[in-house]
Amino acid sequence: MIVRVLRVLVLTAGLIAISSGCGGCGGPTEFHPVEGTVTLPDGKPAVGCIVEFAPFETNATRHNARGEVQADGSYKLKSRVDGVEKEGAMLAKHKVIVTPPPSPPGTTGDPDKQNELIPAKYKKYDDTPLNFVVERGVNSFPIQLTK
């Protein structure tokens, strides 16, 4: 009799866990469009800089999203999942960094000059004051960098 009661309790607990969902286990990750603009402290577009969103949740499968800032200051994020590029970023609260443009291939560039474009507080996830919540639908996040 006790074995039968324990068996029912274990099955019931299992059904409750399955029906309540398990915090992202097994379900597909949703991605939604993210766009915006990035403006430097001097008011100019942050042309060539990289915007990167990283989910706050460390226990979730992390899919960072990145986008390059265009000549007009606009960016659109893309994520890479299992080698496939997807438009947008995953539904989540994200920390956001902005990094200087990379040097063009085959050139040495002036890394110090490029690094001066972006204030230090925006370059590392531990320091950045930027965070945004990606929700269902189109998300627009203008970023105004300050000194």
Image: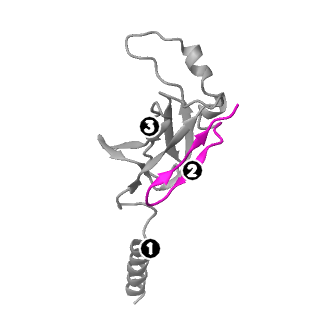
Q: Identify the residue shown where x is 58% and y is 15%.
A: 113
Label 2 crowding class (10 Å Cα cut-off): few <14, some 14-19, many 20+?
some
Horizontally, is 2 left or right of 123 in the view? left
In this rendering, the answer to whether 139 lies above or below 46 is below
Give the spatial CA distance, label 2 vs label 1: 27 Å
Nearer the viewer's eye, disc 3 or disc 1? 3
Give the x, y percent position of residue 5.
42, 86
The residue pinned by badge 2 equals: 132
> Which amino acid does the dot numbered 1 rest on?
Ser
Q: Main secondary structure of the magenta part?
A: loop
The residue pinned by badge 3 equals: 67
Q: In terms of depth relative to the viewer, which is nearer, 55 or 70?
A: 70
Q: Which residues are magenta?
A: 127-147
Closer to the chain start, of discs 3 and 1, is: 1
Give the x, y percent position of residue 72.
48, 34
Label 1 crowding class (10 Å Cα cut-off): few <14, some 14-19, many 20+?
few
Proximity of marks 2 and 1: CB atoms separated by less than 8 Å: no
In this rendering, the answer to whether 109 lies above or below 33 is above
In this rendering, the answer to whether 72 lies above or below 100 is below
Q: Secondary structure at mark 2?
A: strand
> Which amino acid does the dot numbered 2 rest on?
Phe
Give the spatial CA distance, label 2 vs label 3: 15 Å
Residue extending farthest to the bottom is 1
Q: Identify the residue shown where x is 49% and y is 24%.
A: 101
